[in-house]
Amino acid sequence: MGAVSAIDLSENGSECVSVGEDGRINLVSLSGKGGFRRVFDSKGLVSYSSVKWASPLEFVTGAFGFGLHWWDQRKAGGPAAVFKDHWTGGAASGIVHSIDIHPSRKHTCLAGGSSGTVFAWDTRWPKQPVILSGVGVGDSRANSLVESDIWEIQYDNYAHSSKIINSSSSKILPAMICSEDGILAVVEQGEEPVELLAEPCAINGLDIDKQNPSDVLCSLEWESIAILTRP
């Protein structure tokens, strides 16, 4: 039995999905008599590091090598879609630490991981990611404020709200990231990253207030919390 790497609670709170370093994916029922069901066991061939629900029946897992797997409980036997790291050309290898999926654009998921890497996977064009920060394709490299691990990523509904309303469905919406080197920033496709906070310690997690997205809560390495209010 390996350690649990990540968990995510379903929107209605009835199920929790967990992934582990040993390559096991479990669904834990939080209603009725409880219990759990094993969705998949890679027998150690794949080590999972992050997970995020996409719908009541679908979720995405992150793994080593910047890999992402899309799971559909209606399709047994393995992932419904697989995104591999061939786009790095062997120039980079890392771990996906955090995943987010926009509620109105479930075909696109964001991932943040090693070496300041942030990318989007659009399942409509699955072979090529959209790089927002960190490693690039070939000799290119996306604008980046961060060179260390990205610990958490979330879509930022507050940033550039007027652009979001007018943007096409193919444009990746802005995202907020926090990192091991103490950076809290907003990254956006085709734009320079915007630094919001720089701390002398790691920022391990963030949460954007859904009711008032100008407010951001951050957890710091030094067992403390930072609250940021944007104008």
Image (tube, rainbow, N blue to C red):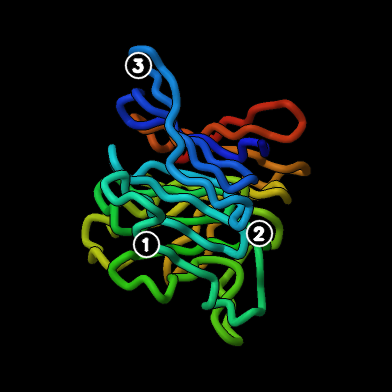
C-alpha span from label 1 to label 2? 22 Å
Q: Position of residue 86 (x, y in %)?
A: 53, 77
Which residue is the site of mark 2? 114
Query: Is the residue marked by circle 3 packed among few (<14), some (14-19), or many (20+) residues within 10 Å?
Result: few
**Amino acid at dot 3:** Ser
Q: Is residue 69 visible?
A: yes
Decide which of tag 2 and tag 3 comes sooner along the chain. Answer: 3
Identify the residue shown where x is 53% and y is 61%: 118
Identify the residue shown where x is 45% and y is 53%: 175
Q: Position of residue 225 (x, y in %)?
A: 64, 27
Q: Position of residue 132 (x, y in %)?
A: 49, 66
Which residue is the site of mark 1? 81
Q: Quadrant of the C terminus?
A: top left
The numbered disc on residue 137 is none
Which residue is the site of mark 3? 31
**Amino acid at dot 1:** Ala
In the displayed structure, 71 sits above or below 123; it is above
In the displayed structure, 30 sits above or below 108; it is above
Q: Is residue 87 left or right of residue 214?
A: right
**Amino acid at dot 2:** Ser
Q: Is residue 213 left or right of residue 6?
A: left
Q: Residue furthest top?
A: 33
Q: Secondary structure at mark 3?
A: loop
